[in-house]
Amino acid sequence: MKTRVIGQRPASGELRRMQFARVLRGPGPLVPIKRRELPYWQQQGWWKDGTGYSGRYQTVRGAFLGWIEQNSQNEFDYYIFQPPEELASHSHWTCFQDRGGPGWYYVHMAVPPADLSSGIMAVERILTEAYQSAHRSGGTPQ
């Protein structure tokens, strides 16, 4: 659509008063917007699967298949499939116990996480630290 300017004239006094009043009044009342209240495990794409949860522990260097068994209301067992080799030189490597199965490792937590999401974050933090320390020591190029 083309517009053709046929002239310019100052805005009427009424229009100027309305615009001025709007500036003084502001845009209107503030309306609080409630943020989504999804737990971390759901935000990260984990899903409930019977008595457990399936998903991936996510880091900037990769994502690792995980399984979490729920034993009671706030008691969980965390597992990871084929953890990265960088983890073997990390101080928490002993917390990852081979279950003798096809690549699954149990993650021992000295202090039980308060909830499912906290446990996922703890495993992801350890994986991230393992990559960072391997990079600092020259073990793995970035």
Image (tube, grey):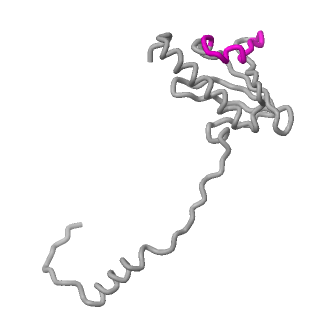
Residue at point 75% right, 38% down? 115
Magenta-tinted stretch: 88-101
Direction from residue 116 to residue 139 in the image, left or right: left
Taking the image as shown, residue 140 lies to the left or right of residue 14, namely right
Furthest-bottom residue in this view: 13
For the residue pair 7 and 83, the one nearer the viewer reads as 83
Q: Which of 117 and 68 is in front in this view?
A: 117
Q: Which residue is drawn at 61% across and 15% down?
A: 90
- As displayed, is residue 20 above or below residue 72? below
Quadrant, the N terminus? bottom left
Tell me if residue 123 is in the magenta stretch. Answer: no
Give the farthest residue toward the left: 7
Q: Nearer the viewer, residue 24 or 57?
A: 24
Q: Where is residue 46 in the image (x, y as percent from the top left)?
A: 67, 35
Q: Is residue 99 magenta?
A: yes
Q: Nearer the viewer, residue 111 or 79?
A: 111
27 lies above or below 37 = below
